[in-house]
Image (tube, rainbow, N blue to C red):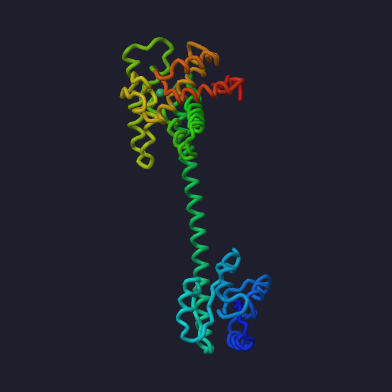
């Protein structure tokens, strides 16, 4: 008991017979037309419908069509009541998604067995659907957790890189933010923006391999020291190459010091040979260098920075991304897009 079967048939006799057969095993309700069945379902949604196919006004197939359009009803399993040997109706019935057929005149045991089996099948199906939903949700949660964790790890790494040099405090995070904004304005998808953000966060990771005394040197660098600094893109890409799950993560680290005119390093790539992501990070990186303090100078004025980006078009920078950067500068009326002074938020 506990499961409800709705019998829909225009013949009162058939309804009574079906009711008598089923009532000891199931809760049964009856309707003598399609319309009456919908009225019954307003009060209680049945677990299964036994449906006569030959009815006036709304026949069995029209009833099924209407039922499928309603979200709460569309998954109710249906057994169709047919005249014996009615093969065409059975074929149409299967096509309409009917689960099984019971031929008239009814045979008690067959009716009980078929109804019981379809109910059991439908219950198992519902359980399975529920289980799949729960497991999918769990997998999604785990994925989000892992993603959040890896972003935290990347941020920590970026902070560690920046901590090597008191004058690059927060540099990686700012470059990541600017790069993401450029990517967004260039029409990149949310996923691409996220990837660019991560690559930009780690663009200077190779500085880990450059001695602190060179990075922190206040005075002019010797040629040798300069050469050591110029190694950081290659060191960075070697470090990141080991992250096999994100094979492209090294792009920003390796090529952010390439120049559009081909005079950059480490590979001397030019124009569109430089991966787009690295061209974006290149603009953001140069912008942040100019808008943060150095041991030998203060933050440059917005006007000077704008002029430098403009002048660097097609020589140092991809002109498209340089223009986007200029647009961002022009919108930043209060010049907040820069390294913050102590105590500033
Ligand atoms: Fe760099």
Question: Is residue 161 depicted above or below 221 in this figure?
Answer: below
Q: Is residue 195 left or right of residue 60?
A: left
Write the residue at 35% across / 16% down.
226
Estimate the x, y position of residue 15 in percent, counting from the top left: 62, 85
Residue under the image location 55 percent in, 21 percent down: 329
Identify which residue is drawn at 64% across, 78% down: 33
Horizontally, is 199 left or right of 19 in the view?
left
> Above or below — where is 137 with respect to 298?
below
Name the residue: 49% across, 86% down: 84
Residue 26 at x, y percent in the picture: 59, 81
The residue lying toward the viewer, choosing from 155 and 66, is 66
Residue 159: x and y, percent? 47, 29
309 left or right of 42 in image:
left
Q: Is residue 145 above or below residue 67?
A: above
For the image, the number of numbered tags is 0
Ligand 1 found in image quarter: top left
Kindly tell me whether residue 96 is visible in this rendering.
Answer: yes
């Amino acid at each position: 008991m506990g499961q409800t079967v709705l019998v829909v048939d225009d013949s009162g006799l058939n309804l009574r017979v079906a009711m008598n057969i089923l009532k000891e095993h199931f809760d049964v309700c009856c309707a003598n037309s399609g319309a009456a069945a919908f009225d019954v379902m307003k009060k209680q949604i049945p677990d299964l419908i036994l449906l006569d196919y030959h009815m006036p006004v709304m026949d069995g197939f029209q009833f099924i069509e209407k039922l499928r359009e309603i979200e709460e009803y569309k998954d109710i399993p249906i057994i169709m009541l047919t005249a014996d040997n009615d093969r065409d109706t059975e074929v149409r019935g299967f096509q309409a998604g009917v689960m099984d057929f019971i031929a008239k005149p009814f045979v008690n045991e067959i009716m009980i067995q078929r109804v019981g089996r379809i109910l059991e099948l439908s219950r198992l199906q519902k359980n399975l659907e529920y289980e799949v939903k729960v497991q999918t949700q769990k997998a999604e949660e785990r994925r989000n957790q892992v993603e959040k964790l890896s972003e935290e790890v990347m941020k920590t790494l970026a902070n560690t890189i920046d901590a090597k040099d008191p004058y690059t405090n927060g540099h990686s995070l700012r470059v990541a933010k600017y790069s993401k904004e450029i990517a967004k304005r260039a029409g990149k998808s949310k996923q691409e923006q996220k990837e660019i953000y991560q690559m930009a966060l780690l663009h200077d990771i190779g500085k880990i391999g450059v001695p602190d005394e060179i990075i922190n040197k206040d005075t002019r660098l010797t040629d040798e020291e300069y050469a050591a600094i110029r190694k950081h893109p290659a060191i960075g890409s070697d470090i990141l190459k080991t992250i096999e799950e994100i094979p492209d993560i090294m792009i920003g680290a390796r090529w952010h010091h390439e120049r559009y005119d081909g005079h950059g390093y480490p590979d001397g790539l030019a124009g569109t040979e430089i991966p787009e992501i690295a061209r974006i990070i290149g603009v953001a990186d140069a912008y942040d260098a100019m808008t943060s303090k150095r041991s030998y100078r203060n933050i440059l004025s917005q006007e000077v920075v704008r002029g430098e980006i403009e002048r660097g078009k097609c020589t140092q920078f991809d002109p498209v991304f340089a223009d986007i950067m200029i647009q961002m500068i022009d919108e930043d009326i209060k010049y907040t897009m820069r390294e913050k002074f102590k105590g500033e938020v």
